[in-house]
Amino acid sequence: MNISADAAQPASVDAVVEMLGAHDYLCDRRLATAILVSMRINKPLFLEGEAGVGKTEAARALAAGLGARLIRLQCYEGIDLAHAAYEWNYARQLLHIRLLGEGADRARAEQDVFGPDFLLRRPLLDAIDNDDAVPPVLLIDEIDRSDEEFEAFLLEILADFAISIPELGTIRARRPPLVILTGNRTREVHDALKRRCLYHWIDYPDLEREVAIVRVRAPEVSERLGRQVAEVTQRLRGLDLYKVPGVAETVDWARALAALGHTEATPEALRETMGAAIKHQEDLERSEEAIAGPSGR
Amino acid sequence: MIANAPDPVESVTLFARLLRDAGLTTGPERVQDACQALLAIDLAHPDEVRFALRAVFVTRREEGPVFDAAFDLFFSRPGGEGKSGSVPGRSRPLALDPKQVKAWMDALGLSTSGVAREVEGPPASSAGYSAQELLRRRDFRDMSWEELASVRRLLRQAPWRVAERRTRRLRADRRGTVELRRTMRSAARQGGDAPQLSRASARRKRRPIVILCDVSGSMDRYSRHLLVFAHAIGRRERVETFAFSTHLTRITHLLRHGDIDSALDHVAEQVHDIGGGTRIADALHTFQRVHARRVLGHGAVVLIISDGWDRGDPDQLGREMARLRRTCYRLIWLNPLLGSDVYQPETRGMAAALPHCDDFLSAHSVDALDTLGKLLAELPRRASRSPRAGAAALAASAGAAGS
C-alpha cells in the first residue's frame, strides 16, 4: 500500500476542516473525510452537486491550504487534447524545418521537431509533468460539459497520472497532482470514469452553516442581515423552482442588500434585489409570493 | 463497530458483498480502496468510517440512501441477539433484525408489489405483403393482438434514422478545413516546403430523442403501441423515455430490455399510474425541473405523445410548453386522435399547447409513425423562432393531416 503521509498534508479529518476553514471555506466532516481519503490513497475526488454549492471553491481552498498551485481546466463540449493536454507549436516547427535547409537529414528533422521544445503545455500536461515542491491541485471543472471522447481520454490520466504523446512517449507524474473533478449533473458521467474516482455529493448547507458561510465570504454583511437572507433562500429551496438558488446566490444577495445600505431584509428590499439569486422569470413570480410571506416579521 | 472487528479487511469484503446485492458497483479494486481509506481516518470515529466508505462505494447521488441503509444494517448488527431474516438476492442469510430488514427492503424499493397485467395471446406466424400494406394504415385502436405483433416487426424494420448534428470533434475530410497537426507531420517528412494539406471537418452525430408518453386512461388504446414504438427506436437511437399520467416516471432503463414483452411488464410494474388521469402540465414541469438538464443536451428532439385531454390548467400547460420549446432543438407533438377524420384540436389543453409545437402529427398507425420517422430523418431548421408563426404553420399541417 502506497500511503504517503506528506508533512504538508493534514493528518486528520479535523485538520482538513480547519485547513479549509482558514481559507474561508466552511465544510462539513463528510466532505473533509472524502478529501482526506482522496489525498491519502492518491485517488481523484469527483464532487457533484447543484450549481453554486461551492464545488470549485473547495478545490481553490484546498490548493491555498496546501500551498499548492491550482491548475484549472474548464471543460466544454468538444474539448480535446489540443486544448486540455498539449499541442505542437506548428509555426515553430515549420520555421525550424525551413531553417535546416535543403541537405538536412529528413528523419532527424522530424525527430527534432517533435521534441519537448516544440510542445505547448496545456493544463493536464502541466499538472502531470510538474516540478513543484508541493504537488499541484488539478481542478477539472464541469466534466459533465465535455463529451464521451474526452472522458475516455481522461481515464489514463486519472488512473496512472500519465499522458501518452505518440511522438514523445508516455510522460508520467513524478509527484502526482491532487485531482478534483466537479460536475453539475447535466448528464451522467460514465461509470468507467467514476470507477477511477472517489465520489462525494455536496448538498446545500443547513441554515447555521449557510449563515456562517455568508459571514465569512461577505464580511461587510451584518450577522442579522446574513441570517435573514439565508433564511429566505433556505425557504426558496423548498419551492418548486426551475433553478434553485445556491449558496453563491445567497452570498450575492446578501452582498447586494448590504451594498444598497440595507441593514435588514425587508420584503421590499428583498424584492428589489431578488435578481441576485433568482434568475428565471417564472421563478421570480413564485419567489415573490414566498418572500411576501413569513419574512415580513 | 469496525474498529474492534477481528479482521477489518474481511468485514469490508462482506460489506461490499451486501452493497453489490443492493445494486452498487463494487469489486476487488473498490474493496482495496476502502481498506486504504480506513487507514487514512480515525476508526474510533463511526462517522468517519461511514463517510470514508461512502466516498469509495457511492458513485451517484441516488446511491447515498441505499448506502446509508446498508451501513446501518451491517455495522449495527447486534451480535447473535438479532432474529433471523434475510436480504433478498443474498445467497446466505444474515442474522438480522426484522425491522432492519424492512428498512432495507424499503431502501431497495422491493416492498412494492407489482401491478397485474393483461394476458397476451401468441403472436401471429407471418403476414403477407398485402396484409402488411393494410396493417400499415389500420388504426392501432382497431387491431387485434395478433395484428399488433406484426406491427412491432414493421416498426423494428423501419428504415429511417434520426437526423444528425455537427459535433465539435473532427474527422478527416478532403473538403474540410486545414488540420495543422497532420499537415506538419507530413511536411516534416517531406521537406516542409510545399506541404500537402490535411483537412478535417466536424464529425456528425445523431441527435438524441426524448419521448414523453401519455399513459393515462384516455390513451389506453394507444399507449401500449406507442411504448412499442419507443422500444423499437430505442434499440438503435439514443432515446430517453418517460411515461406520465398523473406523475412522470422515467422508463428508459425499463425499455432497455431486449424483449419487448418483458420491457412492457417492467413498465407496468414500475409506473403506478397507468390508466389514471392526465396532468400534462405537472408532468412537463417535473420533467423540466428534474430531468431536462440531464437529457436535453446535444440538440435533443422532444416527442410528446398525448391526446391532449388535460385536467390541469391550460395556462400552466402553455407556460410549460413555451419553456420546453426554448430548451430543445425541436418539439414535436404526436396525437393519435389526429388520425380520425372528425378530430379538431379543440380540447383546451391541446389548444394551449399547440402554438408552442414545431410539428403536430398523428400517431395512430404504422404509416403515421413512418411520416414521423421521415420528419426525424430530415429535421429541417425551425422555420421561425416566434411561436406565432409556428402556430400558423401548424394549423396548416393539422388541416392537412386531418383530411
Image (spheres, rainbow, N blue to C red):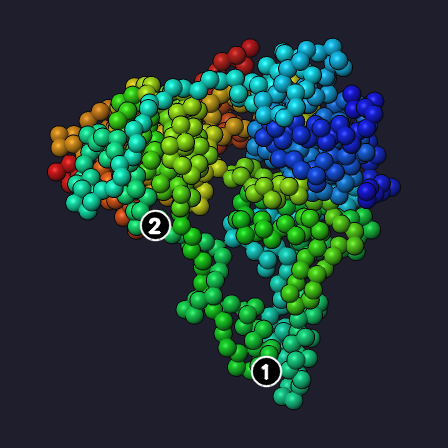
Task: Identify the residue under disc 1.
Answer: B191
User: Percent from the top left, x then y, of residue B140?
Assistant: 23, 32
Q: Is B183 drawn above or below residue B334 in the view shown?
A: below
- Can residue B78 be seen here? The reply is yes
Q: Are marks 1 and 2 in contact (CB under 8 Å)?
A: no
The verdict on a common chain for dots 1 and 2 is yes
Disc 1 sits on a residue from what chain?
Answer: B
Query: In what element is the residue under mark 1?
Result: loop
Q: For the point 45% across and 54% down, which residue is it?
A: B167
* Horizontal relation, residue B1 to residue A148: left or right: right
Which residue of the protein is positioned furthest toward the bottom in this rendering?
A103
The answer to whether B101 is drawn above or below residue B208 in the figure is above
Q: Point out residue B43 in the picture as x, y percentages from the top left corner.
A: 81, 26
In three-dimensional space, the C-alpha distance between marks 1 and 2, rounded to whole angstroms, equals 46 Å
Q: In this orientation, which residue lies closer to the viewer: B172 or A31?
A: B172
Quadrant where the N terminus of chain B is found in the figure: top right
Residue under pointer 2: B161
Residue at image position (62%, 35%) is B25
Q: Residue at x 56, y 68 (%)?
A: B181
Is residue A260 rendered to the left or right of residue B360? right
**Dot 1 crowding, Cα within 10 Å, few <14, some 14–19, many 20+:** many
Precedes in sequence: disc 1 or disc 2: 2
- Give, as a three-letter code, the residue at label 2: Arg
Answer few, some or many: residues within 10 Å of disc 2's Cα (few below 14, many 20 plus, some between 14 and 19). some
Secondary structure found at label 2: loop
Q: Nearer the viewer, residue A51 or B33?
A: B33
Asked which quadrant contains residue A295, the reply is: top right
Q: Quadrant of residue A53?
A: top right
Name the side, left or right, on which B133 lies relative to A290.
Answer: left
